[in-house]
Image: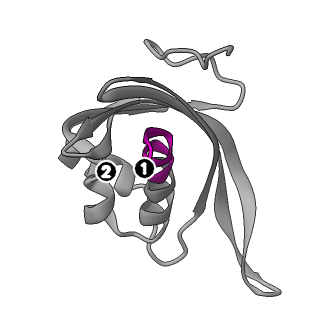
Amino acid sequence: MDDIEGVRRLVFLYGQLLDDSRLDEWADLFTDDAVFTVWGNVYQGRTAIREGIGGMMTTEHPGKHVNYATVADFAGDEAWAWSDFTALADAGPGQWGRSYIVATIARYYDHVVRRDGRWLFARRQIRMGGEPLPDGARPSPAR
């Protein structure tokens, strides 16, 4: 698997594992000292990220993360990636099972590193639609 596919795999696994409430496996997508920033909250370290972000998820009727459009710039064993996503929230019973509504649209700003041949999140920041660029985040590339 080449580097861009490795980073995209990381981004896609993030949503799938979180939505499936597989929080231990999900937390392993982060370095031990990773930083995750969302809505002004900063979670430092894998344990704090698991408890803070994972604690927002409900197991009875979880939402759904739809990740797409990942662009990445590489420098050896580190990369910066930008991924758009849509978060869907459970809206109750629907015609074909559960129904969902769009909860938010946003972009992830990631700094990822390769450790033992595997890409991991070292820093993850979220910019919700209409919000300014997160502090210290690299804007998406123009080329």
Q: Earlier in the sequence, mark 2 or mark 1?
A: 1
Q: Are marks 2 and 1 in contact (CB under 8 Å)?
A: yes
Mark 1, secondary structure of its residue: helix
Which residue does the image show at 69% across and 42% down from the upper left? 105
Task: Say which residue label 2 marks.
Answer: 29
Residue 122: numbered disc: none
Quarter of the image with the C terminus is: top right
Q: Is residue 35 above or below residue 21?
A: above
Mark 2, secondary structure of its residue: loop
Circle 1 Cα neighbour tier, 10 Å, few/some/many (<14 / 14–19 / ≥20) = some
Which residue does the image show at 55% across and 75% down from the upper left? 61
8 drawn magenta: yes
| Picture coordinates of residue 89, whole percent (x, y) | 65, 61
Q: Is residue 133 above or below residue 33?
A: above
Is any part of residue 48 visible from this angle? no
Pick whichever, 42 or 86, lies toward us: 86
Residue 10: numbered disc: 1
Q: Is residue 125 left or right of residue 68?
A: left
| Picture coordinates of residue 30, whole percent (x, y) | 28, 44
Q: Is residue 33 left or right of residue 72?
A: left
| Picture coordinates of residue 36, whole percent (x, y) | 36, 34
Magenta stretch?
A: 1-9
